[in-house]
Each structure stands twice: as C-alpha cells, then as structure tokens.
Amino acid sequence: MTVQGLSQSLAARLHPLPRTKTQLTEMTRTGIGIRTAQVRPDRIIGQIHVYDGAGKGKSQAALGVVLRSIGLGIDNPQQSRVLLLRFLKGPERTYAEDAAIAALQQGFPHAIDQVRTGRAEYFGPDEITKFDRAEAQRGWDIAKGAILSDLYSVVVLDELNPVLDLGLLPVEEVVRTIRQKPEHLEIIATGRSAPPALLEIANLHSEMKPHHHPRGEKGITGIEIYTGAGKGKSTSALGKALQAIGLGISVDQSHRVLIVQWLKGGSGYTEDAAIAALRRSYPHLVDHQRCGRDAIVWRKQQQEIDYVEAERGWEIARAALASGMYKTIILDELNPTVDLELLPVEPIVEALLRKPRDTEVIITGRCQNIPAYFNLASIHSEVVSHRHYSDSGVDLRKGVDF
C-alpha cells in the first residue's frame, strides 16, 4: 500500500477536534512562523557554507543540498552538476553516505561526480603518514581544478575541516582558492574543527551540537532529531532519505522511505522536484506526503485548516509507523507543528515507543519548547546558527536553500 492508500484508508477516521476562539486566545507563547512555498527573489551569487561540530548531520546536510540542486536541474543537468569530493574516506571502508551517493549516481549519472581520498581508518595528528599528506594533496588538486573550472554549480568538500585542522593542507592556500571561486558556485565544507580562517570567509556557518538522552540510549533505537535555528535540518533528513534509498536499490522494497512534510503546503519547493525525480527513478522505494497551507502559520493566529492538515499528516505517519512497511520515515517540520500546538505530544510518544525496532524515524524542525518525545532520541543534533547570509540581506537560492 502506498502513502496515498494509507491516506484514503484513514480518511474516514479523521475527525480533528475543533478549537474554539477561547482556546486559541489562551495560547500565550511568543509567536513563531514557518516559511512555506512563497514567491521570493532568487540570488545568483553562490555562497560558502561550512557545517562543523561534534553532532551528526554534517555530511547528510551536504547531501541534502546536492539532492535539491539535482532536483532543480533535473531537466537541464548542465546547470546543476555537482562534485562530491570526500577527504579522509578511503574506498576500503563503508560509510553511511555511500548508499546515498550510489542512489544519486545510479538515478542521475549525468549530474554528479564523486572522488574519494585518504585511508579508511581514523588517525590523529601524531599518526600522520606521507600517504595521508599525498592523498590530501591529490584531493585538493582535484577540488582546486573543479572550483576554478566553471563546470559545477555545487562543489562539496566533505571532511575538509579536519584535513585543515590536521595540517594536511595549507589553510592559506585553501582559503585563497575558495575566495576566488566563480560567482555562481556554491561551496560546502563539512567536518569537525573548521579553522578560524575558513569560518571568517564563510557566508553560512552551522554547528551540529550533540545532545544525549539516556532513555534513547538505553533501548529506543532509530530515532533521530534535528532541531535548532541553523540551516541543515531538513537537508540532513533528505540526506538520510537518500541513504535509505541507496540501501534499497538492490533488494526491492527492503528500504522503503516515507517523507511526511508539515507546514509546507502550496507548490514550488525544489525538494519536491527532487523527491519526484527520485520516485521516478525508484518508484517502489519512495512515498511523499505534504500537508499544510501555502502560508506562514503563526501562533495565536492558527486557522482551523491548520489543525485539520496537521492531524491529517499525523494520521498518515502514525499508520505508517505501525505498519512496518517503511524502513525510514521522515517527519519533516513535526517539531514546530507540535510547538504551535497543532498536534498533541502524547500520541506521538506512544507511536514512537511502539514503532518496529528496524524502522528509523527522522524528526526535524525548530521549536521553543522541547516536547517529551525528544527524550526517546538516540541521536539529537541541534543546528546552531553562527552565521547565515540571509541575515545580511542576501536572497535565498532555489536548489540550495529551498
């Protein structure tokens, strides 16, 4: 059964409780808003992104941007070609994002190039070998040529930050080359311990800050939460979806993915185009459901349709969680939906406690008040925004930001 079938089967049971004007008036929290698919200017100047920190989600966020870029240019791949250059990730070892990249390369071989460098095992500053320096330089020579070639719309330098922190490449040269990039090019650097010189030229700097929940560590596996004010939450979830799809390529329906998006009504999201493209390539692996109005939803200004749409999405998600049909379920923007009091917390906690052990659940979105289901998370990354180009008046860009 697809998500459409789930939706139809649940329609008869969907009877959301009406909210009265008094109940709406009694909500006293500070208002927050969620930007939905609205007409907005689109910048043409590429920015420099840095994702660092000890929390999970850095490489996933980069993959999410890659997916958005490919989705934007699915009918004109020459305008959205991506280079994914992975430092410190030699081919002798398997990494979580390998499956995601395999899915991209099989579905869109014309849109993505990948290069891997380095050895497979972890090493510290006292264990650096001549091979490590040579591999770092090989990767950087490829990256430098790609940056200056004008062939790519996005260049991802995965794990560049620790390469620089280990002293495997000269920071000054790397920073100088990145500064000289073509005007349209987006550059994304990931990994822990980004050096100050790189952060100084970054237009966007998001830190993935880990949080630990004892209950999640003691038995509730497969629940990941990405929250915070920084960029990288939904993009990390998209990267996780790609990983699941990649794992399911060789075994039909073994890793089906459901993506439920709240507060994202209307049309025009480039992740929708990307997801549609993935469904075209892997129709048996991806289901997608959106709910919400094509408008910003503010606390104390909720409309009845906001409650109806929120509960419609949750009924689909709850049935999917109980069904065992999906190996990965992404609940995008569930956190602000709960924070806006469009959904109660208790049924979500109960559904997560009862989910199949091998079903992974990814929950995204910022919130002011931490809901109880955060205590179930085995992975919780808060995306802290240290710098965002939109704060300086720079327009967002389709295929990168939305």
Image (cartoon, rainbow, N blue to C red):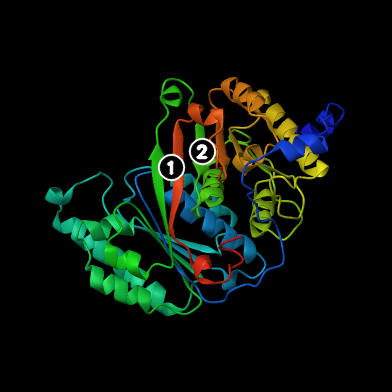
- Inspect this view and state whether residue 250 appears: no
When the figure is inspected, residue 213 is found, relative to residue 258, above or below; the finding is above
**Amino acid residing under circle 2:** Ile
**Amino acid residing under circle 1:** Ala
Q: Nearer the viewer, mark 1 or mark 2?
A: 2
Left or right: 135 with respect to 221?
left
Q: In percent of the image, x 44 and y 42: which residue is there?
A: 381
Q: In percent of the image, x 63 and y 49: which residue is there?
A: 32
Q: Outermost residue, left direction?
A: 126
- Residue 172 sits in which quadrant? bottom left
Q: Which residue is mark 2?
A: 225
Dot placed on the residue nearer the N-terminal end, 1 or 2: 1
Q: Quadrant of the N terminus?
A: top right
Q: Which mark is residue 343?
A: none
Q: Which residue is mark 1?
A: 96
| Mark 1 nearby-residue class (10 Å; few <14, some 14–19, many ≥20) | some
Q: Gap in Å between the C-alphas at discs 1 and 2?
A: 17 Å
- Secondary structure of residue under mark 1: helix
| Mark 2 nearby-residue class (10 Å; few <14, some 14–19, many ≥20) | many
- Residue 398 sits in which quadrant? bottom right
Compare residues 102 and 225 and report the one nearer the observer: 225
- Inspect this view and state whether residue 220 appears: yes
